[in-house]
Image (tube, helix red, strand yellow):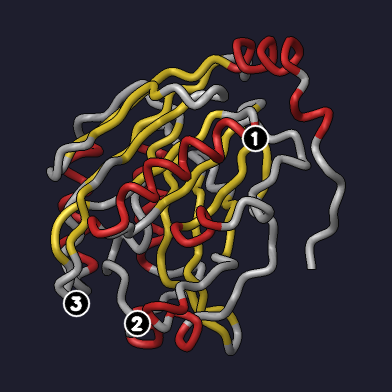
C-alpha cells in the first residue's frame, strides 16, 4: 500500500462568483472519473479569485465541504482545492483536502497576493499544510506561495508538493518555470493546477496545469486554454530510489521559519 498514487486534476473556466454553477461544471467532470486516488481542483474553485471574502465565505460545516464529502465518498477518491473559509473573526483562502472517510486536512495560504490586495481581505495562514495520505506525505500550497522557495523547502521529507492556482496568462512563464524549480530543488513530485478563462476582473488564465517528477520532467500537462482533465499514476519507489542515488536533500541548509 502507498507505492502508487493515481491523481487527476480538473482545469476549468471558473464562473465568476457563481458557486452552484461551478459545482455543476465540476460534477460533469467527476462523473467521468474512476479509479483515481486524488482529484484536484484549482484555487477558489467555487468563486474565482474574488476579494468579496465576507460575502462568499463558508465555514468548515458549509455547503461546499459537504459537497466534497459526498463526491469523495461516491468516487472513493480524495478531493482537494481551495475555497473561502471563515473561522472565528478571520477569513482564509484555504486549501481543503477531503477523504472518502470524511477526514479533512487543510492549509491556509501564507503568502496572500498583495498585488491584488488579497492581504486586505484574507488572513495570512500559519499552518504547514503537511500530512500523510495512503502512505504518501503531501504538502499543500496555493498560487503565490510558488514564488517563495523557502516556504516550500523540503525539510519534512514530503513526497508530493501540490499548488492550486489562479495564475494569469501575463505571467504564465513564471508559473511553468517555478513549478519545475520546486520539483527539482525538493526532489519530489510537483503538481500545479491552474484555471482557464477570463474572470470578473478581466484577467485571463491559460491553464498550463502540469505534473512534474523529482527531476523536473513533465509527466502530464494541459497547455491549451480549455477545460480538461489530466491524470497520472505516480510511483513512490522511483522517487525514493532517485533520492538515495543523488542524495541532494541530505545537503540542504538548515534554517528556521519566522
Q: Residue at x 50, y 64 (%)?
A: 94
Q: Residues within 10 Å of mark 1 (few under 14, many from 20)?
A: many
Q: Is residue 165 left or right of residue 256?
A: left
Q: Is residue 123 above or below residue 8?
A: below
Q: Secondary structure at mark 1?
A: helix
Mark 1 vs 2, N-terminal side = 2
Q: Is residue 167 above or below residue 31?
A: below
Q: Secondary structure at mark 3?
A: loop
Which residue is denoted by mark 3 in the rendering?
Answer: 201
Which residue is denoted by mark 2 in the rendering?
Answer: 51
Q: Is residue 250 above or below residue 255?
A: above
Q: Whole-percent x and y of residue 214? A: 57, 24
Q: Secondary structure at mark 2?
A: loop
Q: Residue at x 40, y 78 (%)?
A: 115
Q: Whole-percent x and y of residue 135? A: 66, 26
Q: Separation of disc 1 and disc 2 at Cα? A: 32 Å
Q: Is residue 244 above or below residue 66?
A: above
Mark 3 vs 2, N-terminal side = 2
Q: Separation of disc 3 and disc 2 at Cα? A: 10 Å
Q: Residue at x 69, y 62 (%)?
A: 127
Which residue is denoted by mark 1 in the rendering?
Answer: 186
Which image quarter is the C terminus in? bottom right
Q: Separation of disc 1 and disc 3 at Cα? A: 34 Å
232 or 116, nearer to the observer: 116
Amino acid at each position: 500500500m502507498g507505492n502508487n498514487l493515481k491523481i487527476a486534476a480538473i482545469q476549468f473556466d471558473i464562473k465568476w462568483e457563481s458557486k452552484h454553477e461551478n459545482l455543476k461544471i465540476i460534477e460533469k467532470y467527476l462523473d467521468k472519473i474512476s479509479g483515481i486516488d486524488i482529484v484536484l481542483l484549482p484555487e477558489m474553485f467555487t468563486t474565482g479569485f474574488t476579494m468579496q471574502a465576507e460575502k462568499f465565505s463558508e465555514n468548515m460545516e458549509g455547503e461546499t465541504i459537504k459537497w466534497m464529502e459526498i463526491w469523495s465518498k461516491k468516487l472513493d477518491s480524495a478531493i482537494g482545492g481551495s475555497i473561502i473559509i471563515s473561522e472565528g473573526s478571520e477569513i482564509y483562502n484555504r486549501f481543503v483536502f477531503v477523504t472518502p472517510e470524511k477526514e479533512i486536512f487543510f492549509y491556509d495560504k501564507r503568502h496572500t497576493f498583495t498585488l491584488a490586495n488579497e492581504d486586505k481581505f484574507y488572513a495570512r495562514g500559519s499552518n504547514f499544510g503537511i500530512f500523510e495520505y495512503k502512505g504518501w506525505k503531501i504538502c499543500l500550497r496555493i498560487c503565490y506561495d510558488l514564488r517563495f522557495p523557502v516556504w516550500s523547502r523540503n525539510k519534512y521529507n514530503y513526497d508530493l508538493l501540490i499548488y492550486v492556482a489562479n495564475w494569469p496568462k501575463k505571467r504564465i512563464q513564471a508559473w511553468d518555470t517555478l513549478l519545475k524549480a520546486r520539483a527539482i530543488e525538493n526532489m519530489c513530485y510537483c503538481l500545479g493546477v491552474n484555471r482557464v478563462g477570463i474572470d470578473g476582473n478581466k484577467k485571463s488564465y491559460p491553464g498550463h496545469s502540469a505534473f512534474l517528477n523529482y527531476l523536473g520532467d513533465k509527466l502530464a500537462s494541459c497547455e491549451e486554454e480549455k477545460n480538461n482533465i489530466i491524470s497520472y499514476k505516480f510511483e513512490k519507489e522511483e522517487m525514493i530510489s532517485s533520492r538515495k542515488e543523488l542524495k541532494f536533500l541530505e545537503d540542504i541548509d538548515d534554517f528556521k521559519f519566522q
